[in-house]
Amino acid sequence: MSKQHILAFPYPAQGHVLPLMELSQSLTKHDFRVTFVHTECYHNQVIKSLAHENPTGYDQIHLVSIPDGLEPGEDMNSVRLLTEEIHEFMSQKLEELIENINQGEGGRISCLIADESCGWALEVARKMKIAKVVAFWPAAAASLVLKFCIPKLIPVEIIDNDGTVLQNQMVQLAQKMPIIKSTNFMWNCMGDTAAQKIIFKFMSRSNKNLKVVDRLICNSTYELEPAAVITLPRIVPIGPVLASSHLGNSAGSLWPQDSTCLQWLDGQPPCSVIYVAFGSLTLFDQTQFQELALALELSNRPFLWVVRPDIYESTHFPEGYEERVGPKGLMVKWAPQQKVLSHPSVACFLSHCGWNSTMEGVSNGVPFLCWLYFADQFLNESYICDIWKVGLRVDKNKSGIIMRGEIQNKVEQLLGDENYKATASKLKRMAMTNVKEGGQSDKNFKNFIKWVQS
Ligand code: UDP
């Protein structure tokens, strides 16, 4: 019998592509054929990045692309990707792709797994009569709860119809869920008001698209966020998806991973290194960048700092910095993050708390220092600091800057208190038990596979 054919469709951003790529990898081990669709812009950058390395285990996945309708030179992270105009264009391209695949030799598509944020792709799947339609939520279940609560937040005037906050207050969406400020709702801290409105509309609409799906799976576990999972009876947690694979995550990477840092880590004392990485989207102004640089220098501890190529271009280190720091600090443009976090020399993770970084830190028992920017990071931080108690926040001063003294203090507090490491190790055991044979996420995943095969 020929293999069943799954089409995987991520939202085109690093934090969405990587977990769906890992999930696809697991599916190929269960004898599915997987075609993985990138947008053209994203595809070109991944292919460029892959040219620098030779990831293993991804040969079963067929990478293809569809045009994204962006203008030449337009930023891949443009909010225009969320607009109706581009959806119409991409829907048509996705339909053409599915038609071509169905007529080819690889076998008809029997299941589409699309990012929950690509509701329009889920509708295309229904229209094209794909038998099984699955939404994949790559973030915390709690952030999906927040999206589903949008219709309740409007009549009580916490937000208006555009998502603008009317009442600045602390909000807890269900008992035992993280408490966050209304001003920190996911759609609020994404830049200008126009962008906020587009993002809010997009989020409200994707809730409706979920009605067409047969299954809703997410990269989390029941034990990590029981209150949120119970609030969403349809959600099936199968995570941490990344922690269940030991291959690393280079096949969907936007930048080549610099693995030389692993040898550098080998040379450091156990549990000594501050690992600093802020995901794929966060930006720094020069003042903040310098404060961080100086804090790491003054910490007197070894550090490994990911300074992405675009940050290298837009900022500069303090005068004579690299010489002064010498072998104590290593800066790389992009790291094999999962491998770094599992290295015994790593003591803590200074992170922007994207959900993937959060899951990766948790799965490796690493305590966090939380340095936030936007989107779901506030909810994730609340899990880390208030609920799981495996990290500390670094706070901005009145001018909105995180000063070197604050960073140094929090590093000392975190590493000076053994409870953080002990709690993080417990949390790791709990998270990893989930994905091991017989764990809850493992059972959910196997049931999901049976259903896809049926
Ligand atoms: N990542 C990586 N190397 C780096 C920094 C990040 O491979 O040097 C990966 C990281 O392992 C994670 C992803 O990029 O899987 C970032 O996702 P996350 O949700 O944490 O943040 P986002 O980029 O979406 O803000």
Image (cartoon, rainbow, N blue to C red):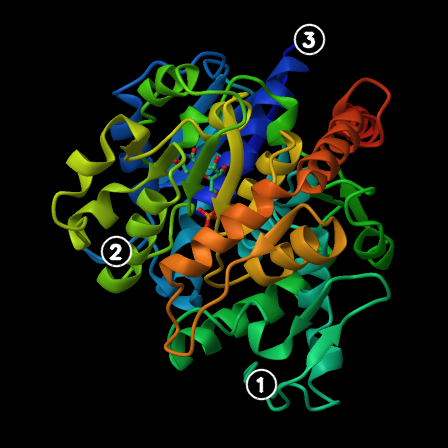
Give me the C-alpha separation between circle 1 and circle 3.
55 Å
Secondary structure of the residue carrying tag 2 is helix
Report the residue marked by disc 1: 165
Indicate the amino acid at tag 1: Val
Indicate the amino acid at tag 3: Met
The residue nearer to you, when weighing 389 against 222, is 389
Give me the C-alpha separation between circle 3 and circle 2.
60 Å
Residue 379 visible at all: yes
In the rendered image, residue 424, in percent from the top left (x then y), is placed at 69, 37
The correct choice, above or below, for 49 with respect to 229 in the image is above
* Residue at x 56%, y 36% (from the top left corner): 19
Report the residue marked by disc 2: 290
Q: Which image quadrant is residue 33 in? A: top right
* Residue at x 31%, y 18% (from the top left corner): 260
Q: Is residue 405 left or right of residue 330?
A: right
- Residue depth check, mark 2 versus mark 1: number of the one nearer the observer: 2
In the rendered image, residue 454, in percent from the top left (x then y), is placed at 81, 25
Circles 2 and 1: CB atoms closer than 8 Å: no
The correct choice, above or below, for 383 with respect to 431 in the image is below
Report the residue marked by disc 3: 1
Q: In this view, does 304 lie to the left or right of 149?
A: left
- Residue depth check, mark 1 versus mark 3: number of the one nearer the observer: 1
Q: Earlier in the sequence, mark 2 or mark 1?
A: 1
Give me the C-alpha separation between circle 2 and circle 1.
33 Å
Q: Which image quadrant is residue 211 in? A: bottom right
Q: Which of marks 1 and 3 is nearer the N terminus?
A: 3
In the rendered image, residue 3, in percent from the top left (x then y), is placed at 63, 14
User: How many numbered circles are shown?
Assistant: 3
